Amino acid sequence: MELTRKQQVRLLIILLAAMASIAMYQRITEPPPRTQPLTYTRGMTAAAPVRRGIAVPGARDADPLTVLLERRVEAYPGVRRDLFQMGGGAAGHRTKTDAATRPAVTISAPASTMPPAPVKSPEEIAADQARADLTKFRFLGYLTDRDSSLFLSKDGELFIVKSGDTVLKNYRVKESGKDYVVLLDTVTKVEVRVDLTGSGK
């Protein structure tokens, strides 16, 4: 069964009217919203009560030092807690010993057999540092037999120098031979002989 155009419009109007009436009925029968007065009004100051601890008798007048000393008082008066006190008698009763009759035991520190280490001067410390640094050099050989240029290495760096040249500002090649080189620190005047690497010396 097909509705005509006029019947469709009439049915749509009836449905819309029914929905509008239902909405109006719900709004009329809806209960009003519940309201409650505010606990704190504007400008009011709220203060929560502070919970106080349990009062201890005599806590106001108690001194922490006094409490500590009272706790340290021996709980069993007359009983000695000496682990090293020896018992005597046939029945195993402990005998009271007078402190004056006990032998006094003195512990003295052992005398040092090693002499005190000498204190080095700043010059000696600088000389030791320079000597340790000079020993890091390695003499690798000459460039050629006719040329007096020689190869030195230190910490992965390679230097091509001659006798009398300066290496790393403070070090100078003082003397060079066929299988050795003498390096001089110009500041501390420390000399170190560096043998040819692989010479067996």
Image (cartoon, rainbow, N blue to C red):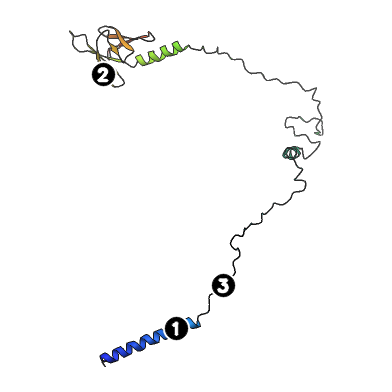
Residue sticking out furthest to the front:
43
Which element is circle 2 on?
Answer: strand
| Cβ atoms under marks 2 and 3 closer than 8 Å | no
Residue 8 % position (x, y): 29, 89
Please determine whether, in this image, residue 101 is positioned above or below residue 123: below
Residue behind mark 1:
24
Residue type for callout 2: Leu
Q: Earlier in the sequence, mark 3 or mark 1?
A: 1
Residue type for callout 1: Met
Q: Nearer the viewer, residue 111 or 156?
A: 156
Q: Nearer the viewer, residue 68 or 198?
A: 68
Residue 59 % position (x, y): 75, 45
| Numbered tag placed on residue 158 in the rendering | 2
Q: Which residue is depicted at the point 32% across and 89% down?
A: 11
Separation (CA) of disc 3 from disc 1: 24 Å
Separation (CA) of disc 2 from disc 3: 93 Å
Q: Nearer the viewer, mark 1 or mark 2?
A: 1
Please determine whether, in this image, residue 24 is positioned above or below residue 140: below
Residue 15 as seen in the image, left or right of residue 100: left
Please determine whether, in this image, residue 147 is positioned above or below residue 105: above
Separation (CA) of disc 1 from disc 2: 101 Å
| Numbered tag placed on residue 35 in the rendering | 3
Q: Which residue is depicted at the point 32% across and 12% down?
A: 171
Mark 3 nearby-residue class (10 Å; few <14, some 14–19, many ≥20): few
Which element is circle 3 on?
Answer: loop
Residue type for callout 3: Thr
Could one spot residue 16 in this view of the protein? yes
Q: Earlier in the sequence, mark 1 or mark 2?
A: 1
